[in-house]
Image (cartoon, rainbow, N blue to C red):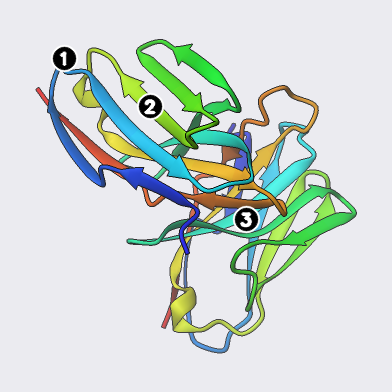
Amino acid sequence: DADVTQTPRNRITKTGKRIMLECSQTKGHDRMYWYRQDPGLGLRLIYYSFDVKDINKGEISDGYSVSRQAQAKFSLSLESAIPNQTALYFCATSDSAGRTDTQYFGPGTRLTVL
Amino acid sequence: KNEVEQSPQNLTAQEGEFITINCSYSVGISALHWLQQHPGGGIVSLFMLSSGKKKHGRLIATINIQEKHSSLHITASHPRDSAVYICAGWFTGNQFYFGTGTSLTVIP
């Protein structure tokens, strides 16, 4: 089984709908991240959490919110989806106790907002 | 404003060639990461370094803190190395910025 899972893997929705993307990890890591990837713009950080009680905004947090329900779960919500939120979304985890802070990425969620 | 700049954007090489991908960054970086994104979209972390040099198989990453520059080298390139290579770093203020990636194609 994959260490970092994302659900759903693909989602098509309409403008104005509320969407939740979920991320779960079995690696026991304390740090979790949400990124989006757009063609030509690369990856950008949306939100990150260094532990369950810690939530931080990234470069492009406007229009998004997150919830760290447990150490293993980090959800990303789009309260009212708009077409320019169409992108590939990645969740990642890392371990602050490790020497390398290597990030482990989920497989991605392709979101299309019509 | 792009905190992390990569070059080249695209690179085509013959199998067996030595490949170098460059990454330059602005002040305030605490650690630099090299990532590989496979044609199917999956992302794998290759290296994290804050000084010196690291080697893993045919991959070598170096960083020069004074010059704010890092390089990723691939020795004896192979078609399976074809992917997008991305550098990224943690900057002052706890923000993580990515380069736009270098798309590498290795031809048999």
Q: Residue at x 45, y 35 (%)?
A: B69
Residues at marks 2 and 3, common chain? no
Does any portion of residue B44 appear in the rendered image? no
Q: CA distance from mark 2 to mark 3?
A: 25 Å
Q: Residues within 10 Å of mark 3 (few under 14, many from 20)?
A: many
Q: Residue furthest bottom?
A: A16
Tell me residue A31's x, y (percent). Answer: 75, 42
Query: Which residue type does callout 2 highlight?
Result: Leu
Q: Residue at x 61, y 27 (%)?
A: B50
Label 1: state its secondary structure: loop
Label 2: state its secondary structure: strand
**Relative to B79, is B92 on the left or the right?**
right
Residue B73 found in image quarter: top left
Query: Which residue type does callout 1 highlight?
Result: Gly
Residue hosting label 3: A34
**Callout 3: residue from which chain?**
A
Residue hosting label 1: B16
Label 3: state its secondary structure: strand
Residue hosting label 2: B72
Point out the tag, 1 or 2, that comes first from the N-terminus: 1
Q: Nearer the viewer, residue A32 or A56?
A: A56
Q: Residue furthest front?
A: B66
**Relative to A49, is B66 on the left or the right?**
left
- The image shows residue B72, relative to residue B37, as above or below, that is above
**Relative to A110, is B13 on the left or the right?**
left
Q: Residues within 10 Å of mark 2 (few under 14, many from 20)?
A: many
- The image shows residue A83, relative to residue A27, as above or below, that is below
Tell me residue A53's x, y (percent). Answer: 90, 54
